[in-house]
Image (cartoon, helix red, strand yellow):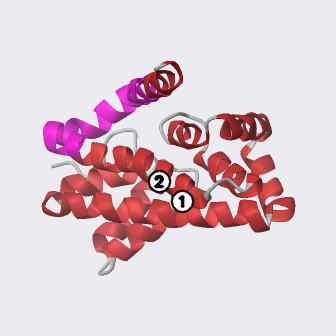
Amino acid sequence: MSSQPAGMSSKAEKWLDKLRQSNHALVLLFFLSMLEATIIPIPLELILIPYMLIERERIWLLASVALAGCMAGALIGYGVGQLLFDSVGHWFIAQLGAADEFEAFKQTLQDDGFWAVFMVGVTPVPFQVAMLAAGVTGYSLLMFISASFLSRGLRYYGLAVLVLLVGERATAVWQNHAGKLGASLLALALLVVGWQYFS
């Protein structure tokens, strides 16, 4: 079985090797997911999918640890937005090159908070934008965490299902159809929002 799929970046390969060789792989996965949610510009899927292939007997545990790490990162990002936006948060948004997305998202957050956060979790808008905007606007922490948990839970448990269904082709399927999956989830969320408004 190939543990490092074609197209995998060298950074992702190094992180996968660290996971495979570590006696504390779950702890490392938790922190890697937390860092990916906050500052590391490497999609966790590039590491998590091949690791799930190697550790199929623990696949649901791996998805749960990745989700827990992401939630920890979400709390950190929310805190930075609430307490340190004028220094750290503003600088970070500039580094992401996401100033326009951030301003637009702040308005969307005020209009449709829960679904706005959920949709960021399944679209190409950087998740950091949602975390910082929720913190800086004082959006409900409980609602922010709930929406983040739902969207990111779909992401990680969906990867586990994908690995179980298609095996070694999971990385290629994800790379070829991630955009379509995100668009489908976004369309579903928009349908729910529309139903709430017009029912």
Of residue 195 and residue 180, the one placed in the foreground of this image is 195
User: Residue 174 occupies which quadrant of the picture?
Assistant: top left
User: Residue 176 occupies which quadrant of the picture?
Assistant: top left
Mark 2 residue type: Ser
Q: Label the magenta part by its dominant secondary structure.
A: helix
Q: Residue at x 50, y 41 (%)?
A: 118
Tell me the tag on residue 77: none
Tell me the tag on residue 142: 1
Decide if residue 33 is in sight here.
Answer: no
Magenta stretch in the rendered image: 161-189
Of residue 107 and residue 96, the one placed in the foreground of this image is 107
Image: 38 above or below 111: below
Q: CA distance from mark 2 to mark 1?
A: 6 Å
Mark 1 residue type: Leu
Q: Position of residue 171 (x, y in %)?
A: 30, 39
Q: Secondary structure at mark 2?
A: helix
Q: Residue at x 35, y 44 (%)?
A: 154
Per the image, the residue denoted by label 2 is 146
Decide if residue 143 is in sight here.
Answer: yes
Q: Residue at x 51, y 18 (%)?
A: 198
Q: Position of residue 160 (x, y in %)?
A: 24, 48
Q: Quick check: 41 left or right of 85?
A: left
Q: Are marks 2 and 1 in contact (CB under 8 Å)?
A: yes
Of residue 104 and residue 48, the one placed in the foreground of this image is 104
